[in-house]
Image (spheres, rainbow, N blue to C red):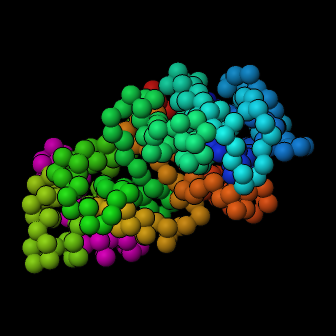
């Protein structure tokens, strides 16, 4: 598989900031990361520098002339900030095509521009909670793991979108072990870390303080960590979350595995709000995406910050390809 193999970028919701950010990303990466957009070239705007390609293999050479676009006709023209039902199925199809291209070895990785789940559900009966679940279904994978990554920090939440009151019940030894194994394997396969250093946060303040502020660290977390350490995993924890994210602490691990959503996302968004990348581990290929939504309120106004999409494409372009 050629190092120049391009990254596939699915268009996401065309009424959002995706089209303008794709162009901004091309401007920034044209000499460094070959990629191509799967979507309607007409959504880029009149006069936008782009090159229609018939095959992903044409993208690296086309990058010098404009944003390479694997053009697909979405029908009605786009109106920034106003999603249309007619665009819903083509958006879904663009994601599926991106997955097919990566799994066929014709693209290096998949980067996904933000979708609007309500628009897809109302326009095309999209039944998945989001991008990630759809990608897992397309790839035939039962469980995947969300990792947020920035230059200063990588974090993985074990439980994600649920009320804090539900976390204790959802946090089982099996879920924790599966998350750790997928994280370990993903960092080895896609990020070139032969022996990933994993720091695991406790659930309770001060990691339970020996059972005085909760016993989940003793009953749920520690047995899993001990078992994986016995297999050769480089794992520390359970650690007190309030001392895990200062600069010196971050030098001691490659990823922090946290017990719930905010425990993971607050530190990374505080450290680097604009360049955070959403990475899906556990797929048979690497998927990245910018850590923001469709931003309908500023779509088409040239106000959107391209930093997260640029970082997502850079990470996809640098990662090991699916064959590794």
Residue 301 shown left or right of residue 211 in the figure: right
Of residues 11 and 8, the one nearer the viewer is: 11
Q: Quadrant of the C terminus?
A: top left
The residue that appears at 47% across and 38% down in the rendered structure is 127
Q: Position of residue 323 (x, y in %)?
A: 45, 26
At 10% across and 78% down in the image, what residue appears? Answer: 212
Residue 84, image quadrant = top right
Location of residue 120 in the rendering, given as x and y in whole percent from the top left corner: 58, 41
Which quadrant does the N terminus fall into? top right
Query: What's the residue at 31%, 42% (across, down)?
Result: 182
Q: Is residue 132 left or right of residue 43?
A: left
| Residue 9 in view | no
Residue at the spot 79% in from the left edge and 29% down from the top edge = 52
What is the magenta range?
226-249
Is residue 116 in view? yes
Observer-nearest of 167 and 264: 167
Is residue 125 within the magenta segment?
no
When the figure is inspected, residue 82 is found, relative to residue 168, above or below; the finding is above
Q: Position of residue 322 (x, y in %)?
A: 46, 30
Residue toward you, 146 or 225: 146
Q: How many marks?
A: 0
Instruction: Name which quarter of the figure residue 245 lies in.
Output: bottom left
The spot of residue 122 in percent (x, y) is: 58, 42
Residue 240 lies in magenta, yes or no? yes
Q: Is residue 254 above or below residue 12?
A: below
């Amino acid at each position: 598989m050629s190092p120049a193999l391009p990254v596939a970028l699915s268009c996401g919701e065309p009424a959002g900031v995706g089209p303008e950010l794709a162009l901004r990303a091309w401007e920034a990466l044209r000499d460094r990361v070959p990629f191509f957009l799967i979507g309607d070239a007409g959504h880029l705007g009149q006069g936008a520098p782009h090159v229609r390609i018939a095959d992903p293999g044409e993208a690296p050479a086309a990058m010098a002339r404009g944003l390479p676009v694997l053009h697909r006709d979405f029908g009605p023209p786009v109106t920034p900030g106003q999603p249309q039902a007619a665009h819903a199925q083509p958006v879904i199809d663009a994601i599926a095509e991106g997955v097919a291209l990566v799994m066929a070895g014709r693209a290096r990785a998949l980067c996904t521009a933000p979708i609007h789940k309500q628009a897809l559900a109302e326009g095309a009966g999209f039944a998945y909670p989001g991008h990630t679940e759809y990608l897992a279904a397309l790839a035939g994978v039962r469980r995947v793991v969300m990792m947020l990554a920035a230059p200063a920090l990588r974090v993985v939440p074990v439980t994600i979108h649920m009320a804090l009151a539900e976390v204790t019940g959802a946090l089982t030894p099996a879920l924790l072990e599966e998350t750790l194994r997928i994280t370990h394997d993903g960092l080895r396969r896609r990020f070139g870390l032969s022996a990933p250093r994993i720091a695991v946060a406790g659930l309770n303040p001060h990691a339970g303080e020996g059972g005085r502020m909760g016993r989940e660290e003793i009953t749920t977390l520690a047995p899993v960590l001990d078992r994986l350490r016995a297999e050769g995993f480089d794992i520390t924890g359970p650690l007190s979350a309030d001392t895990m994210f200062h600069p010196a602490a971050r030098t001691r691990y490659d990823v922090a595995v946290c017990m719930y959503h905010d425990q993971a996302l607050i530190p990374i968004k505080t450290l680097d709000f604009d360049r955070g990348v959403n990475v899906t581990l556990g797929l048979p290929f690497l998927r990245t995406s910018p850590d923001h939504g469709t931003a309908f309120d500023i779509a088409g106004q040239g106000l959107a910050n391209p930093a997260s999409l640029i970082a997502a494409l850079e990470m996809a372009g640098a990662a090991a390809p699916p064959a590794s």
